[in-house]
Image: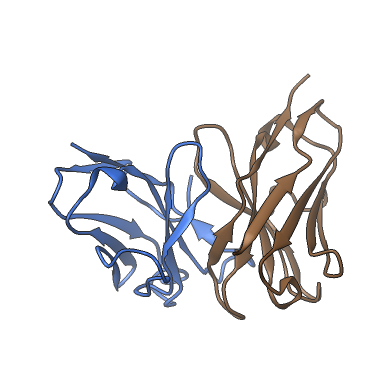
Amino acid sequence: EVQLVESGGGLVKPGGSLRLSCAASGFTFSSYSMNWVRQAPGKGLEWVSSISSSSSYIYYADSVKGRFTISRDNAKNSLYLQMNSLRAEDTAVYYCAREGSSGSYYCDYWGQGTLVTVSS
Amino acid sequence: QSALTQPASVSGSPGQSITISCTGTSSDVGGYNYVSWYQQHPGKAPKLMIYDVTNRPSGVSNRFSGSKSGNTASLTISGLQAEDEADYYCSSYTRSSTLGVFGGGTKLTVL
């Protein structure tokens, strides 16, 4: 069974940093691209970042470019999101999501999410 | 403002059929067959319901179907059931960005 479990969320002050983790199991993690998608309270979904299976291709939304860094450790079956210079508008539930088959543009499995709150 | 336009809400009675639209441009919905649909119940993670416009993942009820005409994609749910009440989001590949784009979401109410 595919499982994605996020951790690392919490309350942080504006300008602070936080590192999110996503532990994957039930599939060959190293074969799949992975994504971070966020959802602000009461709002819709927003793509945040994507990383290919071997980390060769990395993409960011304009809203987080230069502040967030996505990475993965295939030996540990883990995905990460380092978030720096956090702003109030980064407050959201952050989901880790597995991309479908190679070259696809959808996410077939999602974690339960971890809440990040940026507030003084 | 979301890149893809969805109605804020739709409703239907049990057993009826409803359709949720997702309107984009020739740079996204209209130009590629990479539209997907997600169902999200309150407090839960999104669940993939349709991918590549018309394909249903294993385990998703055949009451859910997808289609596309021009720049508008649609999700149709037939034989509405109470458990279908949820938010629905469309998403598409777009050549305007290296990441996909979502619609603003549609709240489905089963009367």
Does A43 sit above or below residue B4? Answer: above
Q: In the visual, does B102 lie left or right of B15? A: right
Query: At which x and y percent is residue A56?
Result: 81, 76
Residue A72 is drawn in which quadrant?
bottom right
User: In terms of depth relative to the viewer, which is nearer, B30 or B64?
Assistant: B64
Q: Position of residue B26 (x, y in %)?
A: 41, 71
Q: Is A32 positioned to the left or the right of A106 in the image?
A: right
The brown chain is A
Residue B38 appearing in the image? yes
Name the residue located 31 percent from the left edge and 64 percent from the top edge. B61
Q: Given the current orientation, which residue lies at the most extreme bottom position?
A: A102
Question: x, y percentage for residue B86?
Answer: 36, 43
| Residue drawn at the location 25% of the way across and 43% of the way down | B82
Q: Residue at x 46, y 69 (%)?
A: B28
Q: Position of B33 compared to A87: left or right?
A: left
State the hue of chain B.
blue
Q: Is residue B68 above or below residue A36?
A: below
State whether residue B107 appears in this view: no
